[in-house]
Amino acid sequence: MDDNHFAKNNICVQMGLSVDDDKYEFLSDVSKALAQAETELQETQAQIAENLETIKLLTPECDKLDYALAASSGAICGVIDVFLVGKPGESPLGNITDKWFENRTKDFAKLCGWDSKENPSVSSAIKFLEKKFKIPYDQRGAGDAASWIFNLNPKNHHFKSLAHNPSVLGLFFSILDQFANTSHFVSEGELISLQEADGKFELRGNNAISKLFCGFANWIGHLVSDTSGSSGSKGRGMGVPSPLWCWTNDVIAIKRKLKIPVSEFDKSVNNLALQIYEKGYDARFQTTQGIPVFINELVVRLMYSIRRFIKYISTTKAEERSLSLLWKTCEPFSNATVKRMLTVAHGTFCLIDVGDAVIRGFITGGGYFNVVEFVLRLNIVGIGRLSISLFGEMTRTIRKSDLTNEVYLLDRKTDIINYYIDGLKLLSNIYDDRSLINFIDDFEHSDFYLQAFAKSVELAEKRNVPEDKILRTKEDIDEYFVVKKNEI
């Protein structure tokens, strides 16, 4: 690369220069600047390689078969959701889930001292737990003052009572009600507090810490007792509200406490949540909806691992195989490919589920769209899981775009550093040739004056001294100084 290249491309190199006591000194010599530039070049190239590796990890490597398998899994699980989950009261899988919760309630009652020999029914276990974990906010409306104050009845009191909600705010109101012997309800967009809710209730504990622990234990124990309905329930009973719908109560309660007006939208959504709860949409049915979503998740990850396992066995020689490499090839958790397959699978599942819910909503609406029927059949768990996948896709896309731009800028930086290094090498060749500039030392030794003349001539040529100005022999030098002396 010659001088013309740097002139045409407007490339220059700056070297720091200091002046001290009429002496000039470079702040850094060419060799040091060259070493620093090469170090920076290596660091930049390493950063580029690291970013390219990250981009590769963020890029899914799905082929057509991967997409087909993922979509098939989503479609099969969608059919399971339509025909085996359905809606409360018409759900074959829901009946199995209800039975499972009943057995877990009995197991918990046994741990707390319930004797199942006398009466092994779930009603007996629930009644035992209700007595064991006594609370003041269990008004059911039947014969209670709450029945005519805010339309509380056995079908809705688990939903309207804030302390019965399986949420952080539900825990807060449970502790508050137990300490203050109160009961808080949400009804028609209003937060209602019932004072002296139970004259016989007394929170156990000798100090604030022990009372707080007892209050927490009572909340957990009473929620477990209500999971399969109350002790006097006929049939399925009204269980604990769905964690994904009781937030409608939380919004109203928080707004009322902060004296923020409750909008008609808040009331409408809360009323919709109450309606679907009264039709059996509780925590048990929410768990039922999670079954096909979990199957979909499991099948996709399993298919991914099986395909990669077969490929690993068929393409890797026996002597090169290792468990660590096998796991790295087949693990179905942290790579972009399996995450893309899950997005496709859950997207297909939700497409079938939403389509079925919309059709049922129109069929049962009698010419209008039945929102309650639609929500009863809409798999909220599947929608939530798809939302997580879509968020992950968006995050990875943004991250990949940022890294791609960064690699582009680093490539430009690499080009600039390379130009800089080329310039330094040119300077080193012209101005940092110590084998030539030591000719002054050679003049001090008469034996080396010939070599000194040769070095001085070569140095002058490198400095682009005009040909007629170069002193090539001792006579030229003598003549030069004689002329200078006469001029003086």
Image: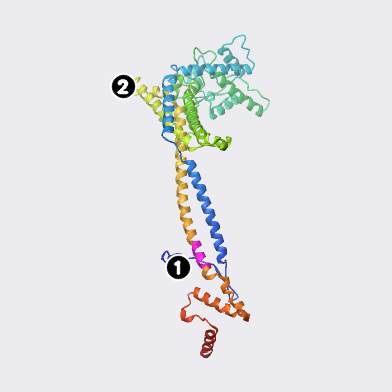
- Mark 1: few, some, or many residues within 10 Å (few <14, many ≥20)? few
Residue 90: percent from the left, percent from the top?
43, 16
Say which residue appears at 50% left-offset and 17% top-offset. Answer: 96
Which one is in front, 242 or 157? 242
For numbered disc 1, what is the local secondary structure? helix
Which one is in front, 445 or 376? 445
Residue assigned mark 1: 3
Q: Is residue 395 left or right of residue 220?
A: left
**Upstream in the sequence, badge 1 or badge 2?**
1
Where is residue 39, by image quadrant? bottom right
Residue assigned mark 2: 367
Q: Is residue 141 left or right of residue 211?
A: left
Say which residue appears at 48% left-offset and 75% top-offset. Answer: 464
For numbered disc 2, what is the local secondary structure? loop
Residue 425: percent from the left, percent from the top?
51, 65
Which one is in front, 453 or 12? 453
Q: Which residues are magenta?
A: 420-428
Which one is in front, 422 or 260? 422
Q: Total number of numbered labels?
A: 2
Residue 331 is one of the magenta-drawn residues: no
| Magenta stretch secondary structure, dominant | helix
Residue 162: percent from the left, percent from the top?
52, 25
Residue 15: percent from the left, percent from the top?
53, 67
Where is residue 432, by image quadrant? bottom right
Query: Which residue is most to the bottom?
Result: 486
What amino acid is at disc 2? Gly
Say which residue appears at 34% left-offset and 22% top-offset. Answer: 362
Look at the image and tell me whether residue 153 can be seen: no
Residue 425 is one of the magenta-drawn residues: yes
Where is residue 267, by image quadrant? top left
